[in-house]
Amino acid sequence: MKITFYGHASLGIEVDDISILVDPFISPNENASHIDINTLKADYILLTHAHQDHVADVEAIAKRTNAVIISNAEIVAYYSNKGFEGHPMNHGGKWDFEFGSVKYVNAIHSSGFADGTYGGQPGGFVIEGERKNIYIAGDTALTYDMKLIPLNTKLDLAILPIGDNFTMGVDDAILASDFVECDKVLGYHFDTFGYIEIDHEEAKRKFFDKDKDLMLLGIGESIEL
């Protein structure tokens, strides 16, 4: 499993020959100006919620790639009405896709499209692949619901928001990693704009002091599990 960071909360995931995009907000992000969305592959697009800083490039990418949009029922209905293919889910539900199983789990946040359309309840994803399991938290506060995840899944990586203000910050992300029982963390949802700028070295030190590994990738950089 290869995971590429495209800035903010945007990720690319490659599982064998399957390409997945998560929350594509790339072209409006000045920090990601070197990423050309027209070159990105996508068989599936996973959306945690409907905010513009998570869905801005969905239509352009899905139109070109015919990607299947996976999200909550309201978000999938929104895009289905525009002619895009989707797979609706809801909290606690799990489905087996060709790249592995996906479970839609709770997140504490809000969700609405830029045009005012209701975007359903926000969520995160637990992806169980053939060899590796990951948790993509989405935009969320720290929540005790995270403790349910390790009851069913042993994680190899937790992808957690760390920018604070709109989501949990570094200190709560450390607690979240305890809750999901995963000490290997990829931080995201930080530095895109002033409200969520962080001190990288301080964040890494705080995780290190708790015997945890916080990875902060540059935009376009990848890790392999």
Image: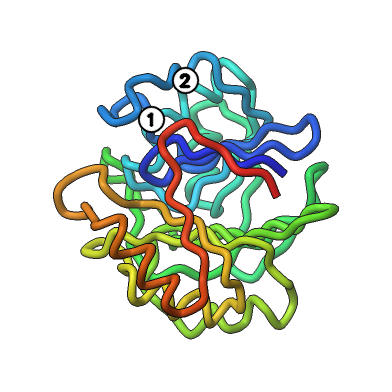
Is residue 152 visible to us here? yes
Give residue 113's quadrant in the image: top left
Camera-side residue: 95 or 126?
126
For the residue labelled by badge 2, is the local secondary structure a helix, a strand or a loop? helix
Whole-percent x and y of residue 58? 47, 31
Camera-side residue: 221 or 145?
221
Numbered badge on residue 26: 1
The answer to whether the residue labelled 2 contacts the one labelled 1, judged by CB atoms less than 8 Å apart, is yes
Work out which residue is located at the far left of the displayed protein and give it. Answer: 194
59 on left or right of 29: right
Q: Is residue 162 above or below residue 209?
A: above
Instruction: Give the residue drawn at x 35%, y 62%.
Output: 162
Instruction: Give the residue drawn at x 33%, y 64%.
Output: 203
By what rule are the colours in the image chosen? rainbow
What amino acid does circle 1 point to?
A: Ile
For the residue labelled by badge 1, is the local secondary structure a helix, a strand or a loop? loop
Is residue 95 visible to us here? no
Camera-side residue: 218 or 95?
218
Whole-percent x and y of residue 110? 33, 61
212 on left or right of 86: left
Q: Is residue 9 above or below residue 6?
A: below
Q: Residues within 10 Å of mark 2 (few under 14, many from 20)?
A: some
Q: Residues within 10 Å of mark 1 (few under 14, many from 20)?
A: many
Whole-percent x and y of residue 82? 49, 28
Q: Is residue 159 above or below residue 91?
A: above
Instruction: Give the residue drawn at x 64%, y 71%.
Output: 92
What amino acid does circle 2 point to?
A: Ile
82 on left or right of 93: left
Whole-percent x and y of residue 219? 41, 34
Q: CA distance from mark 2 to mark 1?
A: 7 Å
| Residue identified by numbered label 2 | 37
